[in-house]
């Protein structure tokens, strides 16, 4: 993803951490579980990026 978007890995890590914090999750795994259980988030999360 980093090479395709011409952004640094630090930028990707920071954005993922921001999403984790906004959802109130503990880590990436917890975020994945929350998103997979809620079809509203899973269908709309990446369309807003």
Image (spheres, rainbow, N blue to C red):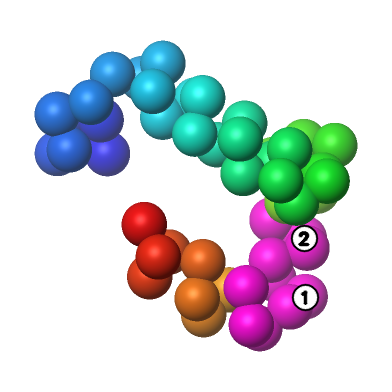
Disc sitting over residue 8 in the figure: none
Disc sitting over residue 33 in the figure: 2
| Magenta stretch: helix, strand or loop mostly | helix
- Mark 1 and mark 2 in contact? Answer it, CB < 8 Å: yes
Assess disc 2: are there few (<14), some (14-19) or many (≥20) residues with their C-alpha within 10 Å of its C-alpha. few
Give the residue drawn at x 75%, y 51%. 23
In this picture, residue 46 sits left or right of residue 19: left
Label 1 element class: helix
User: Is 21 rendered above or below residue 38?
Assistant: above
Disc sitting over residue 37 in the figure: 1
Q: How far across and how far down the image is residue 39, in percent?
A: 66, 83
Assess disc 1: are there few (<14), some (14-19) or many (≥20) residues with their C-alpha within 10 Å of its C-alpha. few
- Residue 29 sits in which quadrant? top right
Please state, as top left, top right, bottom left or bottom right, where the N terminus lies in the image.
Answer: top left
Residue 40 in sight in this render: yes
- Residue 19 sits in which quadrant? top right
Magenta segment includes 15? no
Magenta-drawn segment: 32-41
User: Is 49 rendered above or below residue 6?
Assistant: below
Label 2 element class: helix
Give the residue drawn at x 69%, y 56%. 32
């Amino acid at each position: 993803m980093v090479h395709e978007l011409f952004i640094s890995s630090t930028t990707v890590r920071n954005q993922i951490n921001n999403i984790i914090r906004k959802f109130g999750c503990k880590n990436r795994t917890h975020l994945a579980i929350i998103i997979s259980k809620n079809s509203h988030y899973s269908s709309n999360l990446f369309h807003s990026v």
